[in-house]
């Protein structure tokens, strides 16, 4: 009897070691041993242009999920890109369970070319180009690579943005929600909450065109969500600036997410109270000229409050801009130029 107990205990230990034991991770034809990280420079070409994508794969010492993270889908959004540079050293594969595939800069041409929104090589916005195509122009090919080789291997996914060059933006995390995808919606919600942002925006996708199986997902994280992967967007940083407070906030948020997903040891950030934003109101400009904001991102406004005005190119007033709902300013144009039809302001309706 004693022998049988001892054997059972030994077998149990073997099972535990097998569960904890980690196999190497294969990526782009290379083998990454457990407890190590490796940098990859992906080369893509179309008929006219080249693209490189710098990716770091952190392969944990022990078994666990795969977390995909993208920064620099917009290459002028510096806070997430700089956070990635910090996280290269902060994520310790020896102390990691599972694997992190970290796209350091998805759109290098936009980054090096100092080009807001688009890839200067083909003029396309990478975050409107998913799932991409292996035979399209260079931006389509970058999207295709990320869809297949990063998102396609992930169990959880985070796409990190900030306010592009003219965008005065309030920091928030956001998660994708769909009425028929309750489990991954809730997983995404928990991810967003545990990244430590005061405001969490709900991207409601039920009935949205880009969720249809035969329609393109357009957005990087929407591609993940369509594939059944819990997906979070970060927006942190503004106006193409490099304010350390936002870089730090992203670093802290990613480290907290790793704890929440039990990929590292420790307590994730527990926010005492999160403000959820389920509805957003977008207001666009009727005119072309100068925009003078009276408010900033993060300001709370009530419906009817004057929040700015527009003049023509000679300074003559054209339009006063009023808040069209009560809530918090998530986004506002923060630099003078404005074109008719462009979004001036996005106000989030607050649901405490
Ligand atoms: Zn962006």
Image: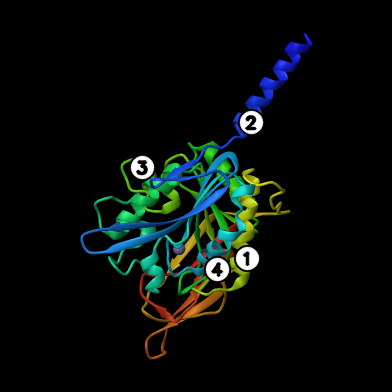
Q: Position of residue 81 (x, y in %)?
A: 50, 65
Name the side, left or right, on which 245 lies relative to 202. right
Tag 2 residue: 17
Q: Nearer the viewer, mark 3 or mark 1?
A: 1
Compared to 164, does 207 lie above or below? above
Q: Position of residue 344 (x, y in %)?
A: 45, 71
Dot 3: few (<14), some (14–19), or many (≥20) neighbours within 10 Å? Answer: few
Confirm whether residue 208 shows in the render: no
As helix, strand or loop, the secondary structure at mark 2 comes to: helix
Dot 2: few (<14), some (14–19), or many (≥20) neighbours within 10 Å? Answer: few
Q: Pick whichever of labels 3 and 2 is earlier in the sequence.
A: 2
Q: Real-space Cα distance between discs 4 and 3?
A: 32 Å
Tag 4 residue: 237
Q: Position of residue 212 (x, y in %)?
A: 36, 42
Tag 1 residue: 248
Examine the image and state in which quarter residue 350 appears. Answer: bottom right
Q: Residue at x 45, y 74 (%)?
A: 165
As helix, strand or loop, the secondary structure at mark 3 comes to: loop
């Amino acid at each position: 009897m004693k022998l049988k107990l001892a054997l059972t205990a030994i077998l149990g230990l073997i099972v535990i070691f097998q569960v904890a034991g980690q196999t190497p991770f294969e990526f782009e034809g290379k083998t990454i041993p457990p407890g190590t990280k490796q940098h990859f420079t992906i080369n893509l070409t179309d008929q006219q242009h080249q693209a490189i994508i710098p990716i770091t794969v952190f392969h944990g010492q022990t078994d666990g999920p795969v977390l995909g993270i993208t920064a620099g889908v917009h290459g002028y959004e510096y806070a997430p890109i700089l956070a990635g540079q910090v996280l290269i050293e902060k994520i310790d594969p020896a102390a990691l369970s599972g694997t992190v595939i970290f796209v350091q800069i998805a759109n290098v041409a936009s980054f090096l070319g100092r080009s807001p929104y688009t890839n200067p090589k083909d003029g396309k916005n990478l975050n409107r180009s998913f799932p991409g195509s292996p035979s399209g122009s260079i931006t389509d090919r970058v999207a295709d690579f990320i869809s297949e080789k990063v998102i396609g291997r992930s169990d959880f996914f985070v796409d990190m943005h900030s306010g592009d060059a003219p965008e005065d933006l309030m920091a928030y995390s956001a998660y994708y929600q769909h009425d028929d995808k309750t489990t991954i919606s809730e997983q995404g919600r928990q991810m967003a909450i545990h990244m430590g942002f005061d405001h969490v925006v709900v991207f409601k996708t039920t009935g949205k065109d880009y969720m249809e199986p035969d329609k393109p997902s357009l957005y990087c994280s929407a591609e993940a969500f369509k594939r059944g992967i819990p997906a979070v967007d970060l927006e942190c940083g503004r106006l193409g600036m490099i304010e350390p407070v936002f870089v730090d906030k992203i670093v802290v948020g990613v480290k907290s997410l790793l704890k929440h997903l039990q990929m590292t040891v420790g307590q994730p950030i527990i926010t005492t109270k999160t403000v959820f934003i389920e509805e957003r109101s977008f207001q666009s400009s009727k005119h072309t000229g100068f925009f003078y904001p009276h408010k900033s991102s993060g300001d709370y406004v009530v419906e009817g409050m004057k929040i700015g005005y527009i003049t023509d190119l000679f300074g003559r007033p054209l339009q006063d801009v009023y808040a069209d709902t009560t809530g918090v300013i998530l986004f506002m144009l923060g630099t003078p130029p404005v074109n008719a039809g462009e979004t001036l302001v996005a106000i989030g309706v607050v649901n405490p």
